[in-house]
């Protein structure tokens, strides 16, 4: 009976040791876990729990990575759209400034030199200075509108001067 009693005590101690092992203690990569620890982790499901926990962490990392990749792609699209918008605005501003310079040149080359012509030249020069400080689409649109109005005034002034 001593033999059976020893086996029973050994089995009981192993089972109790298994109950005392947590999934945290069941590291698959541990240096040299003891036989009792291995048995305890195997019988209590500690290894399986550790594996399940690591798989959940991997899946969460993959989800986080996908979200980060989508955020990066969205940011790059917004940046690209902003660059295109800025380039378009710069092209509009450059065209408006060129148009303004041509109108001013045309006005200065006129044969008749009167007070109205001088005032128009001063207004166009002020508009040129203003155009150098334009920074957004609404300011550029306002400058384009003022240039169009100035061109009409210059055309009317030239026509009036041609009739004299």
Image: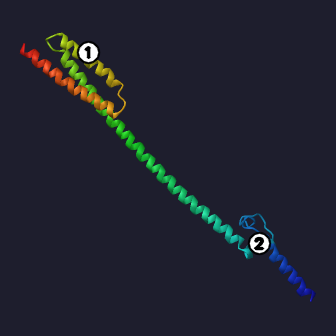
N-terminal-most mark, 2 or 1: 2
Quadrant including the C terminus: top left
Report x, y in % for residue 136. Answer: 36, 33
Residue toward you, 152 or 76: 152
Q: Give residue 47's mark.
A: none
Instruction: Give the structural element (helix, strand or loop) at label 2.
Output: helix
Q: Is residue 89 visible?
A: yes
Image position, residue 113 (x, y; %): 16, 10
Helix, strand or loop at label 1? It is helix
Verify CB contact (< 8 Å) between mark 2 and mark 1.
no
For this orientation, the residue located farthest to the top is 114
Name above or below for residue 7 compared with residue 127. below
Q: Which residue is mark 1?
A: 122
- Residue at the disc numbered 2: 38
Where is residue 107? Give x, y as percent.
19, 17
In this view, which residue lies farthest toward the left? Answer: 163
- Quadrant location of the N terminus in the rendered image: bottom right
Name the residue rendered at 44%, 49% in the picture: 74
Camera-nearest label, 2 or 1: 1
Q: Is residue 98 above or below residue 25?
A: above
For label 2, the crowd category at 10 Å Cα-Cα, with few meaning under 14, some 14 to 19 and many 20 or more, is many
């Amino acid at each position: 009976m001593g033999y059976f009693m020893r086996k029973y005590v050994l089995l009981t101690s192993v089972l109790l040791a298994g109950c005392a092992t947590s999934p945290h203690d069941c590291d698959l990569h541990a240096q040299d876990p003891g036989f009792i620890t291995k048995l305890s982790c195997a019988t209590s499901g500690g290894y399986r729990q550790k594996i399940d926990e690591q798989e959940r962490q991997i899946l969460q990392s993959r989800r986080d990575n996908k979200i980060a990749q989508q955020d990066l792609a969205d940011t790059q699209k917004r940046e690209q759209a902003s660059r295109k918008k800025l380039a378009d605005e710069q092209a509009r501003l450059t065209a408006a400034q060129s148009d303004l310079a041509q109108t001013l040149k045309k006005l200065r080359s006129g044969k008749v030199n009167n007070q109205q012509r001088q005032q128009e030249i001063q207004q166009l020069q002020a508009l040129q200075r203003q155009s150098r400080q334009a920074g957004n689409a609404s300011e550029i649109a306002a400058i384009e509108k003022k240039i169009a109005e100035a061109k009409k005034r210059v055309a009317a002034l030239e026509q009036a001067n041609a009739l004299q």
